[in-house]
Structure formats: structure tokens, C-alpha cells
Amino acid sequence: MNRKRIIVDTDPGIDDALAILYLLGCEDADVVGVTTVAGNADIDIVTSNALSILELVGRSDIPVAAGAHGPLNGQRPPKSSSSHGADGLGSAPRPVPQRQAVDLGAADFIASVVSESLEPVSILAIAPLTNIATFCQRYPELLPKIQQIVIMGGVFGAGNVTPYAEFNTWSDPEAAEIVFASPVSTLLVPLDVTNHVTLDTADLAAVPPGPVHDFLTTANEYYADAREVRTGSRLTVQHDAGAAVCLMHPDIFGVAEGAVVVNCDASPRRGQTTQEPFPSTDGVTKRIATDHNQHSFQQELLRSLQRLASTTRT
């Protein structure tokens, strides 16, 4: 089996953690590295969280590289800790990391992995796109070795941080514009779709008892509490897991061709994404997810988590 080589660029984050654990349970996914960026919490917290998640499931062999402390323009990074807790993971039980991030910064680490890989590398970008934009600008010669970048971000309807913008894109619009305009195949999984990618904590009863189950149920209950306060519903919206499943099984999602343009001005519409036609050329595709099959998503997600939990030592 040819396993898909994947770098996850993330800011864990409860839904980030679910996305990472999903990929670690996929038989046809090979997570070759994790890079972190400030977003759901400060860079030190999200980097520690990434290390903890990997240690939780015995995957300390996967390197973690810390990246950007804030957006390309150097302004103070925004945070969204109200949904994720002060520690970014809803105080879910997990080990204290016994190792540090690698010495390379995120963009340089991505370049190192891509340049040494004999197979194309895919990137799952589920955070502000600062690291990925830096990589694109610093290493343009390596872009042909990127199979695709699957991005959770953007919105074409109502935003979740302003009336017009989604958090990841709004956090660093300049970076998002660089990535969307790059000569790399991209697949955007926008908020319009991920708002309907949901999980009930009761669904996690299908995950075998042990550290994975305990982590997921505690984190998801925190997420559900925060969502209930805002919306009255305890169904948690799994933005990043949606993008991860779309990377591995795009057939679960409706996908259309389309380029993305990001508003980078200082107006109230800063971070807004709009869609433009894009004819695929020279092997580069620009695609946007348009809907998903919730039942198939849930089946695929739980299947992978069950496999991971059953192979993780207590």
C-alpha cells in the first residue's frame, strides 16, 4: 500500500487534536511531521499540545517543529481559547511532553522533509497559514514536490470571527493570499461546509476504553459545553477533522473547481474569501469543498479512532 505522506500544520486546539488522531489511525496515512503556529493559543502552548497528543498514542517518533508566533505583518496574534480552554485542549488528560520540538523552524522543517522525500508530500493546514506562506516564499523550488495542500479555512457566507471572515484566514490574510495564489494544488474546506461536520460525545462510546477514549471524551465535552452556551446545541463542530477526512477521502465531500481570493485590506471585510473560476493547468488544481456526507464522515472518523485506540497502550 502506498501511504499518503502528510505534514500537519496546526494550532491544537480540540478539533485539531481530533484531526491529528484521525490521521494517526488511518492505515493509508503516514504523518511525517507536525508543525505548529500560534492561533487557538500561544505558540508555546500549541507546540506542547502537539507533543502531548503524539505522546498520548506512542508516536513520539513523529517530529514536531514550532513555527510562527504571529501573522506575517507582525501584529499581535488573535486567539480563540474560549472554545478550547486556557490550555487549548479543554483540560483533557494527556501526558506531559518528554521531548522538545526540533531545532528547525516550521517552514525550514517542511522544506527538509519535502526535499528528502522520494514521494510527493501533502500538507493538511488547519491553522492560520503563516508557516505555509513562509515555506512557499522561501522555497519556491520545492513547491512541485507538494502533492496538494488541504486547507481548513475561509468562508463564503457568514464568518465566525467577523460577519465576513473565518478565524484561520482572518488571523493572517496576507499569508492565506500567498498560499491560495501559489502554484500548488489546493483544496479548501471552508466554514460553510465544516459548520455541518458534527460529532456527539455519545458517538465516542464506539472508541475502546483507554487513553484515547478518555482524552477525546473529556475534550469533546468541554467543546460541547462551550458550544451549548453559544448556540444551545451540544453537537460539536469538527472543522479540522472534516478537512482531515477530506484529505484522505475526498469522495465523502462534494468538490468543485474554484480559486480563492482573500481580502487583505484594513476594512471590516479583512480576511473575507471570495471564489473565482480557475481552469486547472499544468497539473495544478484549485478546488473547494461544497458539501459532505455526514454519515460517511462519522463512519470513517470513528473507524480510524477505533483502530488507533485499540493499538495504543494504556
Image (spheres, rainbow, N blue to C red):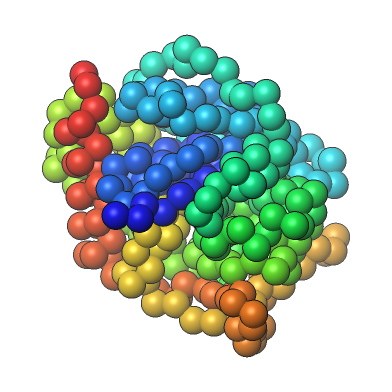
Q: Is residue 161 visible?
A: no
The number of numbered discs placed on residues in the rendered structure image is: 0
Outermost residue toward the front? Answer: 118
Q: Is residue 155 left or right of residue 235?
A: right
Q: Is residue 20 visible?
A: yes
Q: Is residue 217 above or below residue 147?
A: above
Identify which residue, 225 or 117, lies in the foreground.
117
Residue 146's image quarter? bottom right
Task: Identify which residue is drawn at 25% across, 37% down.
Answer: 308
Identify which residue, 233 or 56, lies in the foreground.
56
The quarter of the rendered structure image containing the N terminus is bottom left
Q: Is residue 149 left or right of residue 56?
A: right
- Residue 309: x and y in percent read 22, 33
Task: Identify which residue is drawn at 59% across, 77% down.
Answer: 283
Task: Identify which residue is drawn at 59% across, 69% down.
Answer: 185
Task: Identify which residue is drawn at 47% across, 16% down.
Answer: 97
- Residue 14: x and y in percent read 43, 38
- Residue 120: x and y in percent read 53, 57
Residue 197's image quarter? bottom left
The quarter of the rendered structure image containing the C terminus is top left
